[in-house]
Every structure is written in C-alpha cells, then in structure tokens.
Amino acid sequence: MLKKCLVAFRWSILLYIFLGFVAQFFSTIGIWSLQVVVDRVVTAKHYTELVPEITLYGAILIIAAITHYILEYPHTYLSHSIFEKLKIMALSKVSKIDYAAYQNIGTGEMIKVIENGAAAGRNMIHSFYLQILHDLLPTVIFSLLFLSFYNREVMIIILAGYIIIFIMSYALLRVMYRIKTSLLEKQENMSKYSIRGFMELVVFRLNKRYVQEISRLRITADEVVKKNVQIKMIHESFFSIFALFVIVIKIVVLAYGVKSVISDESSIGVILALLLLIDQVYTPIAIFNVLFVEYKLDRVTYNRFENFLNAPEDINLEQGTEIVAFRGNVEFQHVSFAYGNFKLLHNMTFSIKQGSTVAIVGLSGSGKSTIIKLILGLLKKSSGHILLDGVNIDEVKLNSLYNHISYVSQEAPIFDTTIRENIVFDEQMTDEQIYEILDDVHLKETVWNFPDRLNTMVGERGMKLSGGERQRLAFARIIAQQRSFVILDEPFSALDHYTEQNVMNSLTSLLSDKTIVIITHQLHFLEHVDHILLVKNGVMVGEGSFKQLLHSNIYFQQLWDNDVTDKRKPVVMELKE
Ligand SMILES: Nc1ncnc2c1ncn2[C@@H]1O[C@H](COP(=O)(O)OP(=O)(O)OP(=O)(O)O)[C@@H](O)[C@H]1O
C-alpha cells in the first residue's frame, strides 16, 4: 500500500528529493565559499579586494535559503497528501470489505487502526524514507565529497567514526525500542480508558464508574510519564556521547590542522571548513538514529493498518448479474448459516412473494436480523440457495440490487448531516415535497419548529433527535426513495402506540405496491401483514397468515399469550373462541 502512495506522488517526491540535493549542495558549497573568503583575508592588501568573494558567499547563502523555502512546498504537500490518501484508501476499503470481516474488526478498533495507521504510514514515507533521501543522504554525500577535496585522510577518519557511532547507537536503540514498545501499549490503554469515559457519560455516571476509571487512568498516566522520561534520558545520553565523540574528532583535526598551517601545508580557511564539515557530516547520523527508532515503532502500527487494508472484500458488490428491476420475490431453499463455529440458521426454506407484507417473528436472538442480512447479501450462507426474482444471490451484482431496496435497521441509521439530506441524500426534491413526506410520518410540526427547519443538523448518529423522531426520519427516507423492496427491522420500537398506528397507516398506503419485510416484537401488528415467518433458535417453525398460525401453531400461541405489548387482546380472545 505504501508503494501505491509512492507511485501516486512520484513527481512530487522526485521534486522534493531533487530540491533537497540542491539545497544541501548550496549549503555545503557555502562552507567552501567561506573558506575562500577567510583565506583571501590573509593575502588581501585592501578590504575592497574581498568584494567578489563576499558577494559570492552571500549569493550562495541566499540561494540556499530560497531553496529551503521552496522545499517547504513539496514537504508540506506530501506530508498532508500521504496521510489523507491513506485515509481515503481506508474508506474505499470499507466500501468493499466483506461484511463478516467488518463485524469481526469492530468499528471502535477500526477507527483506531485507521487513524494511527495512516499517521504511521505517513511518517514512514515522509519522516523516514524521504527525510533520508532528500536531507540526510545529500548532506552526507556533499560533506564527504568536500572533505575528500580538502583532505582525504580526514575523510577516512570520519568514515571510521561512522562505524563506531553505528555500533554505539545500535545498543542504545535496542533498549530504547523496548521501552517505546511498552510505552505504546500504555498509551493505547490510556486512550481506551479516556475515550470510553468521554463517550459513555450516562452509563458511567449512573453506575458510578468514574472514580475507578480516573484512578486506573492515573496509574497508567504515571507509567507513561516514567517511560517518557526514561526514553528522553537515553536519547540525551546518546546525544551527549555523540557530541563528545564529535568534539574529540574536531580537537584531533584542529591539532593536526594547526600543525599543517604552521608548516604552511594548509590554510586557516581550510581548517575552518574542515571543522564545519565535520559538524555537518555527523548531524545526519544523530538524526538517523532517532528516525530509525520512530520508523520501527511506526512499522508495528502500520502493519495493523495494512492487515485491515488486506481484509477480504465482497466480490459480489460489483460482479454478477445486473438487477435492472427487482420485483421482490425471495426464496430460501434449505439455507443454513454460521457465525464462525456458531451454527445459527438451520435448513431454512420459505418464500416471500412480490407485493406482499411479510413479518419475521421470533424471540430475541432467534436469527431474524441474520435472515435479513442474508437477503441483503451482506452475510453469505453456509449452504442452500437464496433466489431473488429467481436469480441465485451468488450471481447477483449486489450494488445493482441495492438500487431497489430500502432498509431501516434496528438503530434507524441517521447520519451526521441535515434533516433534508437524511431524507433525500443526493436526490432532487422541493421543500414542499419533503414537508409532505414529513407530514406522512408525523414529523412535520417538529421539524417546522426547529430554528433551521430542514437544514437542522441532527448530530452524531442523530443524537439531537429522540429515538422515535429518528425512526420517523428513517421512514421519511423510505417514502422518499419509493423502492420496490422495503425492509424494516424493529421499526416501531421507539414509537408510542398512537404514533405507531398513524405512521403505519401512512406507510401502508404510500408503499402499498411494494414488497415489505418487517421484523417486529409487537405482535398486535401482525394482524395487518399478509404472511408471517416464525423463527425459533434459527429454525423455521411455522408460516402462514395471522389467523392460520394462531389456530394451528402452538409456539405462536405461546408467544401471543405472553405478549405484554398487545393492545388488542380482546380481538384475540374472539379469534381463539
Ligand atoms: N457478528 C456476530 N458474530 C457472532 N454471533 C453473532 C453475530 N451477530 C449476531 N450473532 C448472534 O446470532 C444470534 C442471532 O442474532 P440476530 O441479530 O439475527 O437475532 P435477532 O433474532 O434479530 O435478535 P433481536 O430480536 O434481539 O434483534 C444471536 O445469538 C447473536 O448473539
């Protein structure tokens, strides 16, 4: 995936590296130019003789400064673009990911992996590879080149120094890496404890969890501080030893240089240039060591991101038979399904006829929502056949099927945008048409009273609306979409009986020609549906009309007798008699 990024930004990267070489060339040649100025001071008779050398030196410094400024463009551009590109790649992955794999990762974990992984990927490219290529490498190359130009022996001493520094830093890095890895774990724990505390205010406050959570966070925070101080001290010890080493080399070179100046074998300018070049040649090594530790840690974080990017995809989304029109006939033939080793649905056979209203009924956990997700092609059956208008679901291009389906899940998914957009998405609709729909779902007055009306932002997961308002907003979307197949998973759970009746009347008249599949625990509603599928522990234990089941199915009768939500028991008593 990093390769993809490198390829996508190849021209900016090449420009960045090229400018890095140019900037370093001028920085290093600046040292040579200073040496020329200093040596001319010794031989010059009048200060005006130095004007050309000083002008050249000034020009070189100005060019170096301008190049460094220009460099900021690809530097900043790449830093942000790589990060954003990796996040776009992540969202594009989610759009294609196999639903079961998505469920296994979990959204909280996924957000953490994506945020941290994209930052780690950016750091690996930008702060490690590119930093080496555009900055450290040209600095070392030009410094060594000029050093060899001045004095080959010094250059050999410097190269030997490189080896000593690498050996010395290798040992320190190992220790530092160990501490940093455990620091990372502690920091992840800290973010876990704080995020859940920030998000679950009501649960935590009512269960008095905050005292424990804060003390747990405090203990972890103490460890984080301790580890950070340890790392800083190791870093500093490395830099101190490193600085000491460079001082020794500079003293040796100075002593050697003074001797050669006195014996007229060298000049003061050359000694000055050598001392400056020694600083310049060793600085990249110090930087490299720091970058390398960061790189290795980023690698760990990035690998988790890459695993996510390599998660299996649902190939049926874009491949298969295009569904131009979906009438709404669904057939399950001996369908079984398992979540991993947990076998949930067993040998299910039933059919849904186009234009009918079908209810799936059963106790909590019996497998109703799973059946819906199989019809939607989100989950894949273990065995059997699922036919949609006679076409095997395995051969259907799912993205074309979704053009014909409206689905309201248990949570009535509302997005963090305006009321208008939650209803129409990208479709064109006038305000009058939207208000008409809102009237059908008994939400018009509520929206009308909001200061921003249709432009009201509903907040994260529709948090600024009540549960029932969220459900009615989701119904409004279904009415606006007018698709041939409508799935409602527990659609009325948050509505009072009065509103439920009114909304239901609107829905049945506005969606009268559609196929509707509805999961509900409110059994009094079942009198209005054409067909009922009765599920118990993943097995189809009955199907038929309300009357048929009530007369002939003992399990359904038990459910009915235990249904405390039923508001129309007298009718039932009549039926039973
Ligand atoms: N991703 C998953 N991994 C493992 N088990 C799962 C997963 N999703 C659901 N289950 C299990 O499958 C069973 C059926 O879940 P399902 O959501 O289909 O039930 P349901 O009948 O719709 O329940 P409810 O009426 O409570 O919504 C439950 O026991 C649930 O724990």
Image (spheres, rainbow, N blue to C red):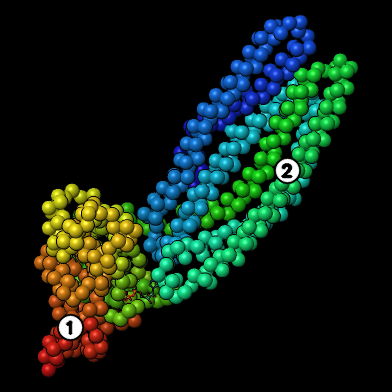
User: How crowded is the residue under tag 2: few (<14 C-alpha within 10 Å), some, or many (20+)?
Assistant: some
Q: Residue 535: x percent and y percent?
A: 28, 80
Secondary element at image label 2:
helix
Q: Which residue is drawn at 50% across and 36% down?
A: 76
Residue 331 seen in the current view: no
> Residue 182 occupies which quadrant of the picture?
bottom right
Q: Are marks 2 and 1 in contact (CB under 8 Å)?
A: no
Q: Which amino acid does label 2 sit on?
A: Phe
Farthest residue, direction bottom: 577
User: Of 309 and 455, which appears nearest the observer?
Assistant: 455
Return the residue at label 1: 567
Q: Quadrant of ligand 1?
A: bottom left
Secondary element at image label 1:
loop
Report, in whole angstroms, how far the alpha carbon at label 2 lies from the one at label 1: 78 Å
Return the residue at label 2: 239
Q: Residue 251: x percent and y percent?
A: 83, 31
Q: Residue at x 69, y 36 (%)?
A: 283
Q: Which residue is drawn at 30% across and 74% down?
A: 368
